[in-house]
Amino acid sequence: MNKFVLLTPGPTMVPERIGKAMQPPIIHHRAPAFVKIFTKVCEDLKYVFCTKNDVFTFAASGTGAMESAVVNLLSAGDKAVVVVSGKFGERWKLLCEAYGVNAVVIDVEWGKAVKPAQIEEALRENPDAKAVFTTLSETSTGVVADLKTIGAVVAETPAALVVDAISGLGATPCLMDEWQLDVVVAGSQKALMLPPGLAFAAVSEKAMKLVEASTLPKFYFDYKKYRKMVEKNQTPYTPAVSLILGLQEAINMIKEEGLENVYARHARLAKAARAAVKAMGLEMLSSPEDAGNICTAVKVPDGVDGNALVKIMRDEHKITITGGQEHLKGKIFRISHLGYVVDFDLILGIAAIEMSLKKLGADIQLGSGVAAAQQVFMS
Ligand SMILES: *Cc1c(COP(=O)(O)O)cnc(C)c1O
């Protein structure tokens, strides 16, 4: 018999409540019954995004919302500052290149957070930059950037600040209005505890000014069409009706727990994961001040193949964690505590990591990481 646990940074586990909420027969998306639901969902999304701005909902994966920000804000030949501190920052760069946007790249060592001063300097040297593209939670390294300070830096300039909050939103604070973020993009299959298939973009008035001037080609993702339709609590094209029903239930769950408590739960799980890593005698990829609360990236001990660890975890223990990406492949593993994860899901994961590492020949004391996590949970 198999029972699966996902300790992954998306897709994440879907609570039974949300699964059930998606079961009813399809409602027509222009019928009053659906419009009523979508009206509430659009309002509630503002709570999750901590904004008064409109939040646009797409039937796409998170990358679709990233693409939407590039094509709606910019024109070919425009300059944009792009922070690359991991796989997902790199995606901003690739998107800019795909559309002929002139990307001024701030290269940050993977595992470190960009310093707000680096962005300040890049904007001083490139006063004609129309936008800054960066990442709240760089899922490839576990690092969470200081978007509050970055927001204050960019707000002083004409540039719009575009944030990939796909793995961060609903797990770690992302105060769009207070931090002066101009576009915040997210996806359904991370902290929102839904299956993949929905992407979101919340857009500020400063960003909408750029939208007016943008000439890059766009059709499905055209923000002007979404803005017009969101006023009628609809989407221009058929929404993913069942996922929207699930989203309503997901937001109900987040509201019941309270956003602050959701952040605190992720922080507590991350603290336990870090304590377990230390107690097992392993090393984190990042310094403690850069490590975020979404996923914990850990260096694989010398002589152990990180890919083999992930495989044993999945095939023998039915627990999915993730390995490293690009040059970190085989060198790190990432244990995620994102979305529908509670203390004992993490305990299972740590126990299985101990057993798998021991099997691969690492010098690991069984129970050491579990005990350290238990200590955190009891304190
Ligand atoms: C998962 C993720 C993405 C990609 O989202 P898709 O839904 O796979 O397109 C982008 N950025 C970050 C930070 C992510 O964690």
Image: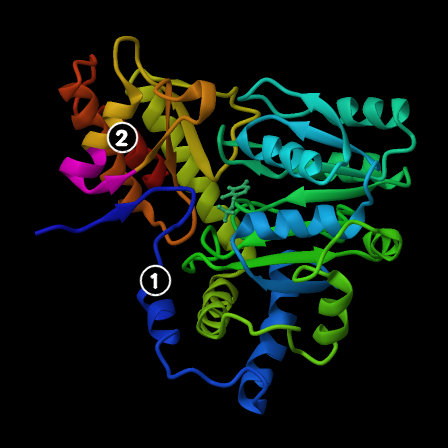
Depth check: give the residue in front, 306 or 210: 210
Residue ID for mark 1? 15
**Numbered marks: total:** 2
Where residue 291 appears, as percent x and y from the top left, is 52, 28
The amino acid on which the numbered mark 1 sits, given as a three-letter code, is: Pro
Depth check: give the residue in front, 167 or 254: 167
Q: Which residues are drawn in magenta?
A: 313-320
Depth check: give the residue in front, 330 or 265: 330
> In the rendered structure, does residue 249 fall within the stretch colored magenta?
no
| Quadrant of res 368 | top left
Position of 53 with respect to 146 (left or right) is: right
Depth check: give the residue in front, 337 or 216: 216
Q: Helix, strand, or loop for circle 2?
A: helix
28 to 81, vertically: above or below: below
Magenta segment's dominant SS is helix
> In the rendered structure, does residue 316 fall within the stretch colored magenta?
yes
Residue ID for mark 2? 310
Determine the CA span between mark 1 and mark 2. 24 Å
Confirm if mark 1 falls within 8 A of ligand 1.
no
Which residue lies at the image location 47% right of the left edge and 62% below the top edge?
257
Where residue 184 appears, as percent x and y from the top left, is 67, 50
Which residue lies at the image location 46% right of the left edge and 50% below the top edge?
190
At label 1, counting other C-alpha atoms closer than 10 Å, the crowd grade (few under 14, some 14-19, many 20 or more) is some
| Quadrant of res 205 | bottom right
